[in-house]
Image (tube, coloured by chain):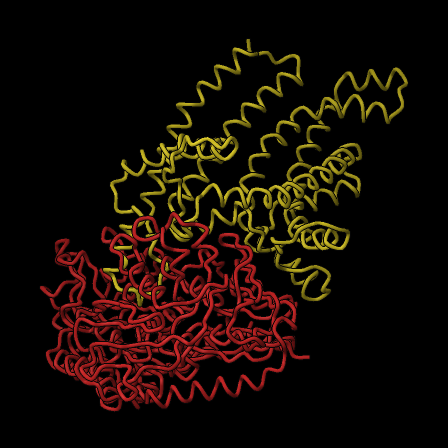
Chain colours: A yellow, B red
Amino acid sequence: MLVFTLRRLLLAIPTLLAISLIIFLLVDFAPGSPMSEIPLTVPPEVRQKMIAALGADQPVFVRYLLWLRQFFWVEPATLFDGWFGTDLAGGEQRILSWQSRSPVFTIIGQRVPQTLIVVGTAYLVGVLIALPIGIYSAYKQYSWFDQFGTLFAMIGFSVPTFFTGTLFIIIFAVYLGWFPTKYDTMLQVTDWPSFVKQLRQMTLPVMTLGLANAAAISRYMRSSMLENMGQDYVRTARAKGMPERTVVLKHVLRNSLIPVVTVIALGIPSIFGGAIITENLFGVNGIGAALILAIHSSDLPMVQTLTFIFAALIVLFNLIADILYGLLDPRIRYD
Amino acid sequence: MRVKSALLGAAATLVLGTAAWADRGSDGDLKITFPQAVSILNPYLSQGTKDVYGASLVLEPLAGIDDQGGLFAKLAVEIPTVENGGISADLTTITWKLKPDMKWSDGSPVTADDAVFTAAYCMDPAGGCAQLSKFDSVKSVEAVDASTIKVTFTGPKPFPYTAFVGAQSPLLQKAQFAACQGAAAPTCTDANNMPIGTGPFTVTAFTVNDTVVLAANANFRDPAKPAFATAVIKGGGDAESSARAVMQTGEFDYAWNTQIPPDSQKAMADAGKGVFVSAFATTTERIEINLTDPSADLPEGERSTAAHPHPFLTDIKVRQALSMAIDRQALSDVGYGAAGMPTCNIIPAPADWASDNTTCLKQDLEGAKALLEEAGWKAGADGIREKDGKKLHILYQTTVNPVRQDFQALIKDWWTSIGVDVELKAIDPSVFFGGDAGSPDTYLKFYADVEMFANNSDTVDPEPFLAQYQCSHAPSPANQWQGDNINRFCDPAYEAKFAELTKTTDVAARQAIAKTLNDMVTKDSTIVIVLVNRGSLSAHANSLGGVIINPWDTQFWNVADWTRLK
């Protein structure tokens, strides 16, 4: 197991380097210019000077090597300096966003907590709703509850979040006036009223995302349960006279959870990736909103750094899921 | 005119001054929302209006521009003119006097050195200053004494109110930005995000591309203002959600740039929580005509250059026919509602500067057909006109934008009905406006017969804007396609008249010349088919008082006077 893990980790290094180069080239070749948002009244020669000041006129490989150095040396060194008061980075230029001229990692640091709170809660809520629905739907296959669960899953699957989100806003914010439509990212939870405020402003985005998450996971849970329900060991358990509750929740559920846990683990990187549409819709300043904004304004350093971090997370969680598999299922061995 | 507008400005501040009863900080929290979030609060490094507007609550110039397009003093004692001796008789210098005892929000005094530094900061060749054109033809900026700033130009400058005028060119504090000049400019994150200013508010917290939190400036020069104790600018989402947050849910007091379709405007206004306000400056949606041949058969580097005149758009009758076939009122109603007005002029405002040219407003399909007949274009078997075996085929490009696609569809219908074959193309705005010399799809390269977008004059005096139609400004491979005369218009008469404008100082005479120049590119030659004068549409809650929308400067030009109506 340890050898397997080490081998996979070593293999991840060239993979990630290749990914970073491909992303860099893709982002660079994408059409658009960091100057496309400035007003037309700014004369062309001033635009050229602004591009030169950003360093955006350098050849692509020079910018790639600079980015590599900044990402793998300057940024960790700056972080280390911040913790221990050393001077490893020596005031070297950090990765700066072209749009805001702020260090990219400062922006990410500001945004990750927001994404984790909102998207993470939505994921948790989604899982908590999905598991019981999946279990009961499978147990009472083709009952009205199962039909209803299927309908719910279909809606969650097929209706895009920009639609459900807007629908929720119109129903719950405009007509009923229960929840705000814009997320106040500066809100500090210090006492009961501010906690209630936080809950209220989280409700709509969490509902929107939770519906989509729950839909997918409940289907996995249901099908995995159904597969196990017909197995011989279930008949044996019943024949031994075990109560139905023990049969379903102990024997069937445990075995059915193995693939579902993998699916849930593989979905975790997407929490860090944020929810581009939902975050934008409700004004949550998460990572997803940052990414789409950076893409719109051709903010290459920001797009590059974010997508690379997503790539690294996906590689990492794939590895974790593989290891989890081995731990959960004794039949799977890597050595 | 200058004195008049200065007086008007002074009168306006006086009236507003007496109207605002509230004490500083007595009206609680002012909540503003922008569809695009603020990225940086230093307008010299900004890439968009959102940043300039956000910064205008904090940073101030020497003089601002009021809602009528006139100048009024902000940090300066008065507007310098030739009459009051502030502008030298040869028009090469302008001397500003700072108001006495002005303080930055940190309590230190505002001095002429801060202005000198600001000019050096923006004019530094390595800084990439976005507002460099405000310092165009500035030779030097000196501090005559602690409160006197003298700007010297390289030659006579009839309109010297560029540097330190308007929200795009405010004063920076030298002490805060001293280490941030030139190549170091972008590295000063704290200074760029939380600049120290003289305006009614100071920044207390800033998250990039999201929220700016502000508090009343304890050192603001008027002890009774601003009425609001705190303010917040929340950005993100889109125009629709911004408008909704003010007009329907009432979560916010003011939303800038709520450009939404006319039917949504009505539905939201009916909710009764707020009002839409619009102001018209010089932004016009127009169709630009390519006077050179964009044909793909030409070798790269010769397409859309003066070497190959356009096969039929060089014929004024064709251009006029295209213009006559358009119903501008219908376009304005469909696309912009309250935020649009049909117009024929590239300089549609202020009234003193706008030509009285309105002939284009009436659609005349029959007249257009007759003109094409006259020009020798006869309808072929398929209804499309042709001449010498060549079809009247037009490639019409614009950016991806729902309103523009509506316009394209409507105009295509009208043009098809007069026998013109129209091919439509929509390009991603970041490519179209990106100015990348390697891309074939930029508005500058103009590899199409006609293209549509909006442009505006940045200043009340349109001289810098009218400069673009000079022959030498045409984009071409020689200047890496960087030029703003995208029509490739070359008319010696225009050049001569423009040269006259640069030498004329009398305001009335300048207005007359500007009107002539406007007519030369619109009704006389129809190289620009102006469609709609687009206003800036914003929304504010019914409970917010003191809002006077200003199309010439930041919409927060008088934010110090805003109050909560009780």
Toward which corner of the image does residue B23 lie, by quadrant?
Answer: bottom right
In this orientation, which residue lies closer to the viewer: B209 or B369?
B209
Figure check: B50 above or below A275:
below
Give the tally of numbered discs.
0
In the rendered image, residue B170, in percent from the top left (x then y), is placed at: 39, 67
Where the N terminus of chain A falls, by quadrant? top right
Figure check: B503 above or below A268:
below
| Residue farthest to the front, as pictured | B145
Q: Residue at x 38, y 55 (%)?
A: B177
Q: Residue at x 31, y 86 (%)?
A: B354
In this orientation, which residue lies closer to the viewer: A164 or B205?
B205
In the rendered image, residue B236, in percent from the top left (x then y), is placed at: 52, 58
Toward which corner of the image does residue B393 lie, by quadrant?
Answer: bottom left
Q: Is residue B464 left or right of residue A3?
A: left
Q: Would residue B357 be seen by someone viewing this image from the given angle? A: yes
Q: Is residue B361 left or right of residue A319?
A: left
In the rendered image, residue B200, in percent from the top left (x then y), is placed at: 52, 70
In the rendered image, residue A9, in percent from the top left (x then y), is placed at: 48, 19
Where the C terminus of chain A falls, by quadrant? top right
Figure check: B22 above or below A135:
below
Toward which corner of the image does residue A103 lie, by quadrant?
Answer: top left
In this orientation, which residue lies closer to the viewer: B488 or B313?
B488
Q: Would residue B319 be seen by someone viewing this image from the given angle? A: no
Q: Is residue B418 left or right of residue A76?
A: left
Figure check: A89 above or below B167:
above
| Residue farthest to the top, as pictured | A335
